[in-house]
Image (tube, coloured by chain):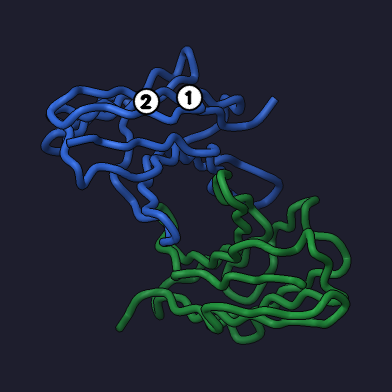
């Protein structure tokens, strides 16, 4: 089982739609959670951190359920510019270090 | 530019040759990560440095791979006797404790 699993996608949605991505993680000792965005042939960039109480940044809402080891990202009123791959990222303890473990990503295409 | 810098951006090499990539992290970041990413997959963790100490190394990192961070600043990743399966994007990221990771633009390696 992968440490971080995401919806395989791809998601093709019309402009203005609401879309939700899900992610599960296997290590219950994980402490930090993030959503990164990666445009085609570019490096990943932080979209938002995910807090236990849930957090919102404009059209984006992230939620964390520690009991179910589940993370979600909701995008409302999607824009063409939201088209990208969304990576679920978990800060996982490993040996003496904490490493960022990435899911395989979910590809989103917002259609005009 | 004060972001993470990687060189070269692209490298084409013949199978069996050695290659070396360089990463210059954000100057105040003491943590440095190397990841490998292939098409359609999220970044896979290779190795992690805290200052000059290599604290974690993935099982993905065969003995043909070696990474250094001699003065706790820049890092190099060397691949010896390259194989076609080594073709990928090699990403470097840096962070401070508790912060998100910032990525460089990556080095795209093609082994022919």
Q: Position of residue B4 (x, y in %)?
A: 42, 74
Image coordinates of residue B8 in percent, x first then y, are: 55, 83
Which percent across, then down, holds residue B5?
A: 45, 79
Q: In the rendered structure, which disc, 2 or 1, sits on the residue that comes first in sequence?
A: 1
Q: Is residue B55 above or below residue A17?
A: below
Q: Quadrant of residue B34?
A: bottom right
Nearer to me, B16 or A89: B16
The image quadrant that residue B3 belongs to is bottom left
Q: Is residue A43 visible?
A: yes
Q: For residue A7, which numbered disc appears in the image?
A: 1
Q: Colour of chain A?
A: blue
**Residue at 49% across, 64% down:** B93
In this rendered view, identify the residue nearer to me: A89 or A83: A83
Do marks 2 and 1 both belong to one polypeptide chain? yes
Task: Give the residue at mark 2.
Answer: A21
Task: Name the residue at 80% across, 69% down.
Answer: B65
| Closer-to-camera residue (A86/B25) | A86
Q: Furthest residue to the front? A: A112
Q: Look at the numbered discs 2 and 1 and tell me whether their residues touch, using CB distance below 8 Å.
A: yes
Hue used for the chain lettered B: green
Q: Is residue A79 left or right of residue B100?
A: left
Q: Quadrant of the N terminus of chain B?
A: bottom left
Dot 2 lies on which element? strand
Q: CA distance from mark 2 to mark 1?
A: 7 Å
Q: Is residue A14 above or below residue B28?
A: above
Residue beneath the point at 77% across and 53% down: B60
- Which chain's residue wears label 1? A
């Amino acid at each position: 089982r992968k440490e971080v699993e995401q919806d395989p996608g791809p998601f093709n949605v019309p402009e203005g739609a609401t879309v939700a991505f899900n992610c599960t993680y296997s290590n219950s000792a994980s402490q930090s959670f993030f959503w990164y965005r990666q445009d085609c042939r570019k490096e990943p960039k932080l979209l938002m951190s995910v807090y236990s109480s849930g957090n919102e940044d404009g059209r984006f809402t992230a939620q964390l359920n520690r009991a179910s080891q589940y993370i979600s990202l909701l995008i409302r009123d999607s824009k063409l510019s939201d088209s990208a791959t969304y990576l679920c990222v978990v800060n996982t303890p490993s040996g003496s270090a904490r490493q960022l473990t990435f899911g395989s990503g979910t590809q989103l295409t917002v259609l005009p | 530019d004060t972001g993470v810098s990687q060189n070269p951006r692209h490298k084409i090499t013949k199978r069996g040759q050695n290659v070396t990539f360089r990463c210059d992290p954000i100057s105040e970041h003491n943590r440095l990560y190397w990841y490998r990413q292939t098409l359609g997959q999220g970044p896979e963790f290779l190795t992690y440095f805290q200052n000059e100490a290599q604290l974690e190394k993935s099982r993905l990192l065969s003995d043909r791979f070696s990474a250094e961070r001699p003065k706790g600043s820049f890092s190099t990743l060397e691949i010896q006797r390259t194989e076609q399966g080594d073709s990928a994007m090699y990403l470097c990221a840096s962070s401070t404790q508790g912060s998100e990771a910032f990525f460089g633009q990556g080095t795209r390696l093609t082994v022919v």
